[in-house]
Image: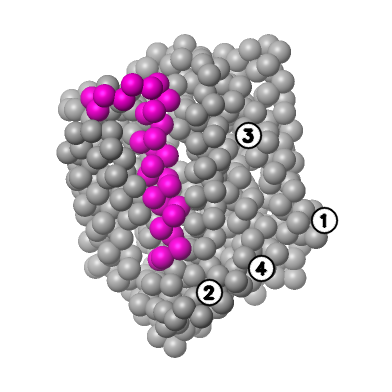
Amino acid sequence: MSPPSSAPAHTAGVAIPFREFVCLVAMLMGVNALGIDSMLPALPHIAQSLGMTEHNQQQWVISAYIMGMGASQIVYGPLADRFGRRTPLLACISLYTLASLLASVSTSFESMIAARVLQGVGAAGARVIAVAMVRDRYEGREMARVMSLALMIFLAVPMLAPSLGALVMLFAPWRVIFHVLAAIGACVVLWVALRMPETLHPEHRRPIEAGKVLDAFRMVVTNRASIGYTIASALSFGGMVGFISSAQQIFTGALDGPEAEFPIFFAFVAGGMAVASFTNSKVVMRLGTRRVSHGALIAFILLSAMHLAATVFLGDNLISFSIFQCVTMFCAGLMGANFGAMAMEPMGAIAGTASSVQGMISTLGGALIAVVIGQSFDGTATPVVGGYLLCGLGILITVLFAERGRLFRPHHSDPAKPQ
């Protein structure tokens, strides 16, 4: 693996090696996945321990985290554009670590949800600032390649996180899972403090002034490509989290799978996204972000329609559901990194604020969509599969809006060769 040919001249500090930078970005994204997926095997035990009476109520342990992560991203962009990337990043990962410890001592549903929201607030900064750091150093197809490589490493986390949670519960109560999350957060804080230089040059820092911040927000939401691909990301994320929040119930309930094998099932499904990220890192520089993501979108819609038809008329079983879900996740993975890169293309001058606004819309919007899908769980896989199809059709509409009705056509900032 070799680094892209060059980085923008405004990058500050002495850059860490390319491989380490990709791994650090992946780890900053990974704390988000750990905060979600390591909980999945423990949800029934958490629900029983904290006295949750409704079966779907346990999904709020996931939803509260994602909502906290989504709603707070709007804050981190202006902070990162004003104070640089390092200081806000160290603060938010420290908050994530503290909230993990608070969740570990929760004694009621309300205190758990409050700690999870706070944990999500801390995780939000990691997501926003990681994307901004990548945009500080790379752009266009180079940025999409870096994001794909980071996601390829990062996606090992959701594959392994349920196994981590299940492994912890073989030897200790569910509360120890939060102790593990706190330890990982502390390690990330140390890594950033010792190794990561500032990536935002002082001359590109923006003061926190209400008028300028609002103007930056206006630039994000009024740019056709930015808002179109941000909404597309929200719909894609919503369908995925709708599945994640009800995955344990689908596996053990609708599909009659043994609880001990749930981590294997989840790793297989998540493996589709990992393969997609690896594939994207290999082909995006040659084919371009639009050809790859638009082709994946068409396949996503067709697969979701086929899966829904099979579910309604033939019924699902563990094998068919797993295969359909894995291939659908592969398509979602090809869309994910490219949608994010295309949304950021016109936002280089305000990368931090743009990342936070786009992140808030995509994460909070996706969380709300996921709540609707997850709370519709009725003992079958139909709500999740139907949700995927509706999200896919919504993505198609927003992509057509972003591209003025044209698919597959390279953009002027998406040239045949990196610039």
| Circles 4 and 1 in contact, beta carbons < 8 Å | no
Residue with the most extreme right position: 405
Q: Which residue, given by chain and number where applicable, does mark 4 sit on?
A: 222
Horizontal side of residue 222 vs 275, given as left or right: right
| Circles 4 and 2 in contact, beta carbons < 8 Å | no
Of the image marks 3 and 4, the number of the one nearer the N terminus: 4
Q: How crowded is mark 1: few (under 14 residues within 10 Å), some or many (20 or more)?
A: few
Was residue 200 drawn as part of the magenta stretch in this picture?
A: no
Of the image marks 4 and 1, the number of the one nearer the N terminus: 4
Q: How far apart are marks 4 and 2 (CA)?
A: 12 Å
Q: Distance between the residues labelled 1 and 3?
A: 22 Å
Q: In the picture shown, does residue 91 fall above or below 51?
A: below
Of the image marks 3 and 2, the number of the one nearer the N terminus: 2
Image mark for residue 388: 3
Residue 178: name its quadrant: top left
Q: In the picture shown, does residue 406 fall above or below 326?
A: below
Q: How crowded is mark 2: few (under 14 residues within 10 Å), some or many (20 or more)?
A: few
Give the extent of the magenta segment. Answer: 49-76
Horizontal side of residue 117 vs 325, given as left or right: left
Mark yes or no: residue 147 visible.
Answer: no
Q: Which residue, given by chain and number where applicable, does mark 1 sit on?
A: 405
Mark yes or no: residue 400 visible.
Answer: yes
At label 1, which amino acid type do we have? Gly
Query: Circle 1 sits in a helix, a strand or a loop, which is it?
Result: loop
Q: How many marks?
A: 4
Of the image marks 1 and 3, the number of the one nearer the N terminus: 3
Q: Residues within 10 Å of mark 3 (few under 14, many from 20)?
A: many
Image mark for residue 214: 2
Query: Circle 3 sits in a helix, a strand or a loop, which is it?
Result: helix
At label 4, which amino acid type do we have? Thr
- The residue located at (34%, 43%) in the rendering is 35
